[in-house]
Image: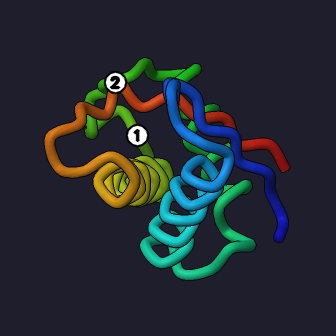
Amino acid sequence: MSYTLKLYAMEDVSAAELRAAEQRFRTALETTLGDADLVAPVHAAYQRIVMTYGEAPDPDALSPHELEIFTQWQAAESAAVVATWGPNRYLGDAQFEICP
């Protein structure tokens, strides 16, 4: 695997439940992006875009490539949150860390 994942805000769960939640999160990210090797670089590119343009950039301010990365990561993160915590969880509540 080309990245490590740590989920936060998972109080009161066993180690086995945490591992299962992390696996669901990984699977959703990897399925949505197309491959495990894409998770770390797409996440890093998304973070650079957010640092440059903010959390909700004007799509017209982004290059076509930046817009593609931005929307791909948002779709992958949303799928991962739903797979891990269910459809009633807000993205802002999901706390995770991805490291290459």
Sort mark 2 into few (<14), some (14-19) or many (20+) by Cα contacts within 10 Å.
few
> For residue 39, what is the image quadrant?
bottom right
**Amino acid at dot 1:** Leu
- The answer to whether residue 87 is left or right of residue 39 is left
**Residue 48 locus on image (x, y percent):** 63, 32
**Residue 34 locus on image (x, y percent):** 53, 81
- Which residue appears at 56% of the width and 72% of the height? 30
- Which residue appears at 60% of the width and 42% of the height? 14
> For residue 88, what is the image quadrant?
top left
Instruction: Indicate the quadrant containing the N terminus: top left, top right, bottom left or bottom right.
Output: bottom right
Q: Label 2 belongs to which residue? A: 92
**Residue 17 locus on image (x, y percent):** 55, 52
The reply to whether residue 99 is in sight is yes
Sort mark 1 into few (<14), some (14-19) or many (20+) by Cα contacts within 10 Å.
some
- Give SS at disc 1: loop
> For residue 52, what is the image quadrant?
top right
Which sits in the foreground, 77 or 85? 85
- Numbered marks: total: 2
Which sits in the foreground, 53 or 92? 92
Which sits in the foreground, 10 or 96? 10
Q: Which colour scheme is used?
A: rainbow
**Residue 26 locus on image (x, y percent):** 58, 63
**Amino acid at dot 2:** Gly
- Which residue appears at 85% of the width and 50% of the height? 100
Real-space CA distance between mark 2 and mark 1, rounded to the nearest whole angstrom = 22 Å
Q: Is residue 49 above or below residue 18?
A: above
The reply to whether residue 64 is in sight is no
Which label is found at residue 62? 1
- Whichever of callouts 2 and 1 sits on the residue coming sooner in the sequence is 1
- Give SS at disc 2: helix
